[in-house]
Amino acid sequence: MFRPRQGDAMAEFHSDERKSPESSLWAVVAMSGRVIRIAEVYASRSAALADKTWREAQVRAYAGFLESSAQPIPIYAIKPIRRTDLPRRWKPLPALGFLNGRL
């Protein structure tokens, strides 16, 4: 049996509790060229996926307009995010914000 000697430092072990993917925040990220913006933040991955799908449908609906006006077409993705990673004055990006030059 191991017994530490007096003066030896005791190592503390903590359980490796990893957050499940569903317990973290998920961001819908809009990318256009080198510009990356956080469009929206959700508590669940499924809600973020639904929003991403809806935003992609909006882009498809306005694809002709985007091509004729030479605007870059945004690409959407979802990524896990920590609340501390959000910019200080972050506000959600409107679904069609790219039409107003807000991307």
Image (spheres, grey):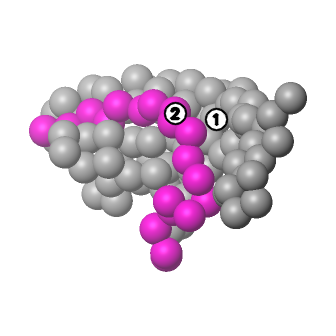
Residue type at tag 2: Ile
Q: Residue 83 vs residue 86: left or right? A: right
**71 falls in the magenta region:** yes
Q: Which residue is mark 2?
A: 78
> Residue 102 lies in what quarter of the image?
bottom left
Quadrant (top left, top right, bottom left, bottom right) of the N terminus? top right
Q: Which amino acid, mark 1?
A: Ala
Q: Residue furthest bottom?
A: 89
Q: Residue at x 56, y 25 (%)?
A: 53
**SS for tag 1?**
helix
Q: Residue at x 56, y 39 (%)?
A: 80
**Outermost residue to the front:** 5
Q: Are marks 2 and 1 in contact (CB under 8 Å)?
A: yes
Sequence-wise, which precedes: disc 2 or disc 1? 1
In the rendered image, is residue 43 in sight? no
Q: Is residue 56 left or right of residue 18?
A: left
> How far from the left and from the top, in percent, is residue 3?
82, 42
> How far across and how far down the image is residue 98, in percent?
35, 49
From the viewer's side, name the closer residue of 70 and 43.
43
In the depicted structure, whether residue 22 falls above or below residue 8: above
State the image quarter where residue 30 is shown: top left
Position above or below: 72 against 99: above
Who is closer to the viewer here, 13 or 19? 13
On screen, residue 83 versus residue 38, left or right, reads right
The mark tally for this picture is 2
At x 45%, y 31%, the residue is 77
Q: Which residue position is annotated with label 1?
A: 48
Residue 62 image point, x, y percent: 37, 32
Q: Residue at x 68, y 57 (%)?
A: 9
Q: In this view of the protein, can residue 18 be seen by the observer?
A: yes
Residue 73 lies in magenta, yes or no? yes
Q: Which residues are magenta?
A: 70-89
